[in-house]
Amino acid sequence: MTDVTIMGMLAGNLPSIIGIIIGGLCIAVGVHFVPVGGAPAAMAQATGIGTGTVQLAAGSGLTGLLAAGYMYMVMSAGGAEVGMSQIALICATGAVGAMIMISVTMLVGNWVYIYGVGVPPASAKRDYDPITKDPQAPYVAAGTVGQGLPTVCFVSGAIGGLLGGLGGSLIYCMLMWVNADPAISSIFAIGIFVVNAVLPSYNIQGTIEGFHDPKFKRVPKAIVACFVASLLCGIIAVIIPSAAMLAGGA
Amino acid sequence: MEPAMGMGLVALMGAAATVAGCSEDLESDIGSQSNPNSQVQLAAQVGYPHRIFNKAISGEPPSNAMYCAVGAGVAMMLMSESVMSASPLLAIAIGAFVAALLNGVFSTTAYLGRNASQTRFNQYVYLDVLRNQILSLMGHAYIATFCIVGLSYVLWEQTLIGHPFPFPVIALIWGLCVGAIGSSTGDVHYGAEREFQDFKFGSGLNAADSGNITRFAEAGVRSSMDNAWFCSKFGGPATGVAFGMVVFLDNWRSTAFAEVLNGWGAVLVGLVIVLALVIYNRQIETYARKKYGPYPEYAGDIEA
């Protein structure tokens, strides 16, 4: 009896599960766009932002989630139905919030590299910046693999923020469809976000410069892994409120 | 809410965020937390024992998220009517104090554990280092947590902005955000410049020099206090400006332009802000390339 009900819950919430998977895949791809240099970048020994992949992706994506959560509340005020057009606006708000966070971080990071450390931003993965066509190799300090954030990394990072914020907000909206409780939805959205940010980090192995980095070609593997992980997360996210309802008889 | 009131709150949150960002970065500089810690940890192993505080509790974002969530949790409990209905200011102050105590516990165990495990490299546990730095670590953690829990309260309180997320979750997200920003901006000033001041300014850090950190100060042996003094001139304030900008710009566009074009105005303004940041970044990039020029050691065939 219980099995049938849970299966029914899963079938009834299929759009939410699909939305959670799409959101998870957005995050997985977005993480690859974010130029992270890890510990070497903090010593100006590698191009990118000087922190870890997950931490930065989570920092930006969750900032977007805050904006999206507020927007969801405004959209659903007075018991209004939140449909696809509202979700598009909520996701766009979250995506732009994440873009602002990551762009400001990269800009101020570049201030520190340029004015504080005295090194020009340069990429070591390409001889010429794919966007500005500026030569990179002569500006890479000896014994390092680049430093700072040249334009291509900055643009890539902004795209990464957009995808991360979009994915996080979409997951939140889908969870709100299932349980309509901002508290549970926000905590679950953070959890699913972190799952989908951690898995691609194994592809990145500490440093990636953005979409022009050879490691970016590994994205398909992350998509497969995150598809499976998001599917499981989606099923659990749908079952838990249902199980609570069954147990409570509500 | 009236637009003027909304803007005032956004400005207040931006100001609190600026202080929080600066304090958070200086806390991590004193304790050598986050990525620059790899050099402090490595130094003794490659033959350079030192008297710099060494605590890598975790990455900065998770540890700050924890302090802020704990602070907000305690404050929320104290404010609840079933406990003592404390005034928000008092509750937030006590919450931040509890978070600072946690910071003290983690810092002490991290310092003792890390240095005790490096005895074989002649890196000893210096009790005076522990005694002298621990209170400044806790003090900076207190300021950062107080400001972030305060701005989260403004965001959460129903009579002010009224965000639907629970208070501790909002504080957790802002704590994660300030840690990510501090670790990617201010820490670079400590890790790439202050730790390697023996090397020529702007020469870059050859990977072969990893671990050869500057151990002697302007006078005597360098301590973590000297590092905080140096980083408070640029790295700390830069982190504060970054976090303040994130909090202010994000909330400003969603508060001031929420009614424009059915909400899409806020999205468009956000995109314009990002575009402006990309253009400004390009400008400072070209400035740096012109000002500093190519590296003289470069021997390839690509023209600068």
Image (tube, rainbow, N blue to C red):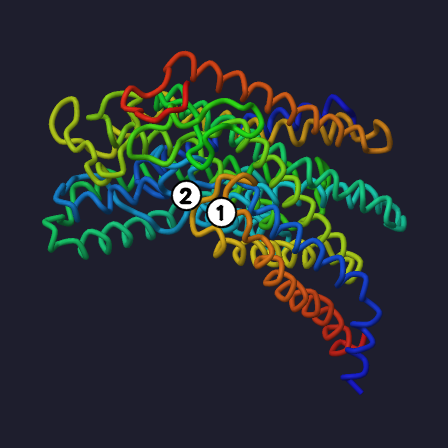
Circle 2 — which element? helix
Give the CA distance from mark 2 to mark 1. 7 Å
Label 1: few (<14), some or many (≥20) within 10 Å? Answer: many
Image-based side of A241 in relation to B283, left or right: right
The foreground one among B243 and B87 is B243
Judge whether A170 appears above or below A242 on screen.
above
Q: Residue at x 21, y 35 (%)?
A: B213
Amino acid type for the residue under numbered disc 1: Thr
Q: Residue at x 27, y 23 (%)?
A: B297
Judge whether A206 appears above or below B228 on screen.
below
Badge number at residue A38: 2
Circle 1 — which element? helix
User: Whole-percent x and y of residue B245?
Assistant: 57, 26
Task: Specify the farthest residue to the bottom.
Answer: A1
Q: Residue at x 40, y 25 (%)?
A: A113
Judge whether B17 appears above or below A60 on screen.
above
Q: Residue at x 32, y 39 (%)?
A: B36
User: Whole-percent x and y of residue A46?
Assistant: 39, 37
